[in-house]
């Protein structure tokens, strides 16, 4: 029997997930959490085989929780369940130690397949992504930053609403250089516009001190 911990802040969604998982002959929900911090506490106590982790939760978000779960409960596999279909989120979760990434808008069979794959030691990525989106070894990516510190700073300032000219003035670089840094970072992360940049910044905690 696969012991599953559900970490999802919306009670209605969590109830639906519980019914889905408990309806499977080889799975059972052993615990639930409504935020990232509670997910860590419950995982320490219950040591489930799999944590199904929402990416966007109050307090500690799913990315931070995934990193902490890998460090503190390494035997527990993490399957991210999220509405975010951006490659940047996928990359970050793989680097954080998640072995599954499933979209909420996909059929429920995808989540069940991801849970079963996780306990078998296999990685499962929602079919909505192309294989090229995730075929690079995340361990190798983790040792080489996806973006440089300067590119990250340009994106962070873009996320809080600064114009290219304002960023250039603050960083004492040319506007053209700002544009190059921004374009390079967005290309590397697979971000398609300012909305993606803002979501990525929130996910990584870049906006907490602004």
Image (cartoon, rainbow, N blue to C red):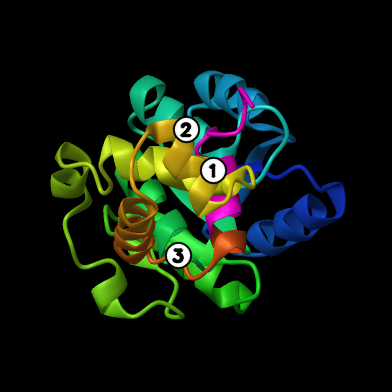
Per the image, the residue denoted by label 3 is: 191
Location of the C terminus (image quadrant): top right
- How far across and how far down the image is residue 51, in percent? 52, 42
Q: Residues within 10 Å of mark 2 (few under 14, many from 20)?
A: few
Per the image, the residue denoted by label 1 is: 166
From what the image shows, is residue 26 above or below residue 98? Answer: below
Q: Is residue 138 magenta?
A: no
Question: Could you say whether the residue bearing mark 2 is in a helix, strand or loop?
Answer: helix
In primary-sequence order, the first of circles 1 and 3 is: 1
Q: CA distance from mark 1 to mark 2?
A: 6 Å
Res 113 quadrant in image: bottom left
Q: Which residues are magenta?
A: 197-210
**Do residues under tags 1 and 2 come within 8 Å of each other at their CB atoms?**
yes
Per the image, the residue denoted by label 2 is: 170
Q: CA distance from mark 1 to mark 3?
A: 21 Å
Q: CA distance from mark 2 to mark 3?
A: 23 Å
Question: Residue 1: in sight, yes or no?
Answer: no
- How far across and how far down the image is residue 34, in percent? 74, 35
């Amino acid at each position: 029997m696969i012991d599953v911990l559900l970490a999802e802040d919306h009670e209605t969604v969590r109830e639906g997930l519980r019914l889905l998982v408990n309806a499977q002959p080889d799975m059972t929900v052993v615990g639930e959490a409504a935020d990232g911090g509670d997910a860590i506490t419950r995982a320490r106590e219950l040591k489930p085989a799999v944590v199904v982790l929402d990416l966007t939760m109050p307090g500690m978000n799913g990315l931070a929780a995934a990193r902490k779960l890998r460090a503190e409960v390494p035997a527990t596999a993490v399957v991210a369940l999220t509405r975010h279909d951006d490659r940047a989120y996928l990359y970050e979760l793989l680097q954080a130690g998640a072995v599954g990434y499933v979209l909420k808008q996909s059929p429920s069979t995808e989540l069940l397949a991801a849970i079963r794959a996780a306990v078998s030691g296999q990685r499962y990525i929602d079919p909505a992504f192309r294989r090229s989106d995730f075929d690079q070894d995340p361990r190798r990516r983790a040792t080489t930053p996806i973006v440089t510190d300067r590119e990250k700073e340009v994106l962070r300032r873009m996320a809080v609403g600064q114009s290219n000219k304002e960023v250039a003035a603050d960083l004492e670089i040319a506007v053209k250089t700002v544009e190059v840094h921004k374009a390079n970072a967005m290309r590397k992360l697979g971000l398609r516009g300012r909305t993606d940049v803002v979501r990525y910044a929130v996910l990584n905690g870049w906006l907490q001190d602004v």
